[in-house]
Amino acid sequence: MHPMSLTSIAAVVGGRLADALDPEAQVTQPAQFDSREAIPGSLFIALKGQHTDGHDYVEAAITGGAVAALVTRPVGFPAILVEDVLTAFGHLGRSLLFDPLGTAKVVAITGSAGKTSTKDFIAQVLPGNVVSTPQSFNNEIGLPLTITMGDKNTDYLVLEMGARHIGDIRDLTQIAPPDISVITNVGTAHVGEFGGRQNIAQAKGEIVEALQPDGLAVLNADDDFVRDMHQRTQGRVVTYGLSEQATVRAVDVTIDGQGQASYTLTTPEGSARVQLQFVGDVQVPNSLAAAAVARAAGLSVQESAARLSEALPRSRWRMETNTRADGVTIVNDAYNANPHSMRHSLDALASMTGGRDQRSIAVLGRMNELGDDARTAHEEIGRYAAELDLDQIVLVGEDEAGWMQDGVRSIGGKAVHLPDQDTALDLLRNTLRSGDVVLVKASRGVQLQQLADALLQPNPDPVGA
């Protein structure tokens, strides 16, 4: 973070200092909302949640080195008092973006699926000093936090923007107006909250509505909802995808035995071969979006292809692949799940097996926030998994797992339905053998990544032990 005094921060956020012995003390490090992450020079953001109140952890943050805290009430430690911490934090982010980060270009990314992987690709392909959203901190907290990670030497801020309601992305673009807006797709993630794909498209499109005439909209040509968003922006438009009409295309796509895709990157300026190190064919469009952004940044097609081929997964629990010493491969894709991402992950699992000593094992849990479509969506995923002729399907949980089992059975398939992660761990621990590939996939709220982590241990303990 560019150094700012407590006095300057208070002026920017419309607050006042309390218990600050040195009003000119400098905040020099990124903000933190977890007191355990506070370091010397940081600013602690005392957020109040459903179950915890950051004000109770200010002392721990100050002890860890935080210069001060952003609070709504005096806490007996150096602080900046404001009416609303989250609103004030947004004001700080916007202020930093315009000064001293005014020369940094903002690349904003949204979509129902693939945001984080696309963000990781873009962050590694762009030239210069790039700051990107950590993990999936893509809301009104994570956005200004990411901005505080930049400084006057930052060339690009790559910001993931999420939404659960119409208007959420519009609010985020008020904090960080984009120079380049990327939309991956319009799927069914959070469809229960939005009330339909039309509403999801309305929300996602706010990211291109925020562009100025000299801005650039990067749109997925293979998604009808996204492609039509060219009508909603005053910026220039470039498309990407497998479609022949796409400006930036992938042709001759192949998937190897590790589930990694290669293709020929084709642009109006030429073509070059790409070999991805991410797992899953869904990474092809994600990487194409990055290629379109790199093209706008002035990189040649050869440079873009080389950087895409070197890019590595940075975010945990997204097709995170590890092979145990005994030859069992665990694919941890338990960060989130919706019908779109479930299908792609199952496809990737099927592509990673096929040898004589290899077995494909899908361990699936609940998909959240599907509203009235939940039962049908889970049954369809069960059928889809069964149609892939996987060696074993393990369904973990209660109602939703049962619905998936109904889908499997509807086409004559077989699946094991287990009540919890511990029983699944016990089954897998006793049946896995060298060469097996195990996909672990569910929505974040299921916490199925714990099972994936336990499977990587030499002698797995019960989940959560």
Image (spheres, rainbow, N blue to C red):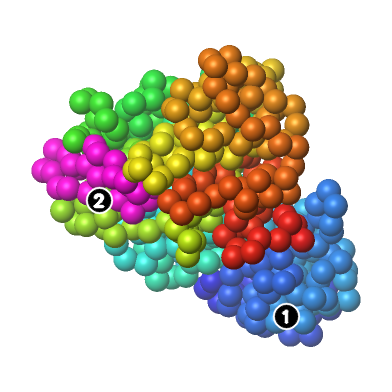
The residue tagged with tag 1: helix, strand or loop? loop
What residue does disc 2 label? 275
Q: Quadrant location of the C terminus?
A: bottom right
**Above-or-below relation of 182 to 329:** above
Q: CA distance from mark 1 to mark 2?
A: 43 Å
Q: Quadrant location of the N terminus?
A: bottom right
Q: Is residue 79 left or right of residue 440?
A: right
Give the prevailing secondary structure in the magenta stretch. Answer: strand
Dot label at residue 64: 1
Q: Residue furthest left?
A: 270
Q: Is residue 289 visible?
A: no
Q: Is residue 370 visible?
A: yes
Q: Which numbered disc, 1 or 2, marks the residue that appears first in the sequence? A: 1
Q: Residue at x 71, y 65 (%)?
A: 34
Residue 330 horizontal/vertical position (percent): 51, 52
Q: Magenta stretch?
A: 253-279
**Above-or-below relation of 35 to 353:** below
Residue 321 horizontal/vertical position (percent): 46, 54
Residue 333 lies in the magenta-colored region? no
Q: Residue at x 67, y 50 (%)?
A: 425
**Above-or-below relation of 249 to 243:** below
Residue 291 horizontal/vertical position (percent): 28, 46
> In the rendered structure, which amino acid carries the disc numbered 1?
Gly
The residue tagged with tag 2: helix, strand or loop? strand
